[in-house]
Image (cartoon, helix red, strand yellow):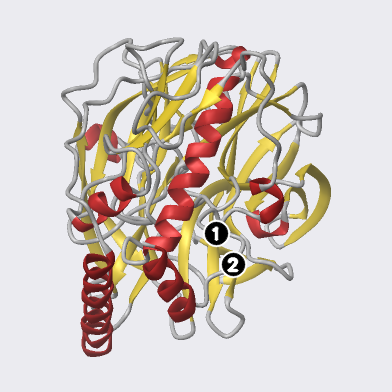
Amino acid sequence: MLLLLDLERSIYRLDRKGATERAEAAILALSPRSTELPDVVIDLAGDGAPPSGRRTLTPTFNGVPGEIGVMAALTAERDILIELHDTARPQRPWTARPASPDREVFAATLDAALSCTVALVLKAIDERRVSATDTVAPAAHAPTGFGTAASLAWASAVVAAKAIRLLGILAKGAKEWRIGWRGDSGRASLLDRGEAVFRVLTGGVGSYLADPFPFRHRGRDFIFVEQYLHSKNKGCIAVVPMDEQGVAGPVEIVLEEPHHLSYPMVFEHAGQIWMIPEAGESGKVTLYRAESFPYGWRREADLASGTEDYDVTPLLDDAGIWFFAAERLWRSSSWDILNIYRADSLTGAWSSHSAGPVVIDAALSRPAGDFIRRNGQTLRPVQDCTRGYGCGLTFCRIDALDALDFAQTPVGRINAGAHGCHTYNRRGGIEVVDLFGRVPNSKEVTLSYEPLSAALPGSRSSEDSVAAVVAEAG
């Protein structure tokens, strides 16, 4: 196992500060614990009787202690399931389903899984969070063992698979993002119709478009997007103006920073137009105000700093604002951890939800668009990253949201055929999505909405999306 990790670090030039590094000498030199009975024992071996303690936490990966369970899941093409067995609640293990940013790089996947494990352990230890929503996952079958020969054979197969994939990309063309849009003028949405045809808009040569957010201002529609510039290796925020006939105008950049920007969450509040773009790599969540809409934006305030928050999506209520965000912790991906923050006002101080992180699940965490008020329910679009970033979009109904609890139920999903999809929004007279795949010649694409028959009232999960301040869903 260590040989495989060292080999991958050399081939892929991985950072040496990951969770898979050998323990530092200072940690190994720690003195033995005192003779007093510890409050909590974290049993990382799980292969025998752990040291006695008032409470014992034992993590397993697909039913197996240690990293061998992660490798077994990867080789069998299964999702990774973390179960944290807790003697304080023996019938209800804490669970997490981490994303696999690159399932063919074991060190990176193990780093992400172990980072989510740390988050889960900290959540379990924090007694304020015992009321958080949890699920009991089915037990996984124990895998066969992996020795050095098996590890190297697996690595060789991965290298061959990557080479074949590269040849396929060269032959067929790389996959890219583009957006789909349709003018609905108050007609039924995709969720109501079940199927709709969207026009396709690409970024042209040298860029791609993603993360569309429509906005109507003084009777005119605009679509804000991420425009990723290959020449600069980063995203900027751009706008696509729509004319009275619903024809898309030229794409024009309206906001650029030294770091990557995407997910232009545009909304109206207190008579002003605001934007919270995704800027996770900056370590800040920054609020911008429109000085000359739609082309002039001014940095108004840093809402949070010192954290990697992605796709921040605000939800107003009578007493303040909830901010939903995908959070990257240590070596985790930014796809599988959902945290919620509370503020008394738009620029007020953030406080983390007492049950945070409220979800650790690649299928139900990262925001995928504005909230939606529909049929008396609040829906949350969610990225389904179980098979990779941008591979699917699920709508979740928010069943509970207060200072102590959060619960959501998946109620439907978008079927984009061979395309990936990770953003949905509808506002004013425009309904938009984004699409991931090889760019075809077709200028239209048909999408469908599939209700989930298993979605039952009171189940604890997530759904749909609602406009942060001005909800204009049909």
- The one of 41 and 437 positioned closer to us in this rendering: 41
Quarter of the rendering occupied by the C terminus: top left
Seen in the image, is 411 located left or right of residue 131?
Answer: left
Residue 92 x, y percent position in the rendering: 35, 15
Residue 131 x, y percent position in the rendering: 51, 10
* Dot 2 and dot 1 residues touching (CB under 8 Å): yes
Give the vertical position of 25 relative to 79 (above or below). below
- The nearer-to-camera label among 2 and 1 is 1
Residue 379 x, y percent position in the rendering: 41, 27
Residue bearing mark 1 = 21
Query: Which quarter of the figure has residue 456?
Result: top left
Seen in the image, is 350 located left or right of residue 459?
Answer: right
- The kind of residue on which mark 2 rests is Arg
Is residue 58 something one can see in this rendering? yes
- The kind of residue on which mark 1 rests is Glu
Label 1 SS: loop
Residue bearing mark 2 = 16
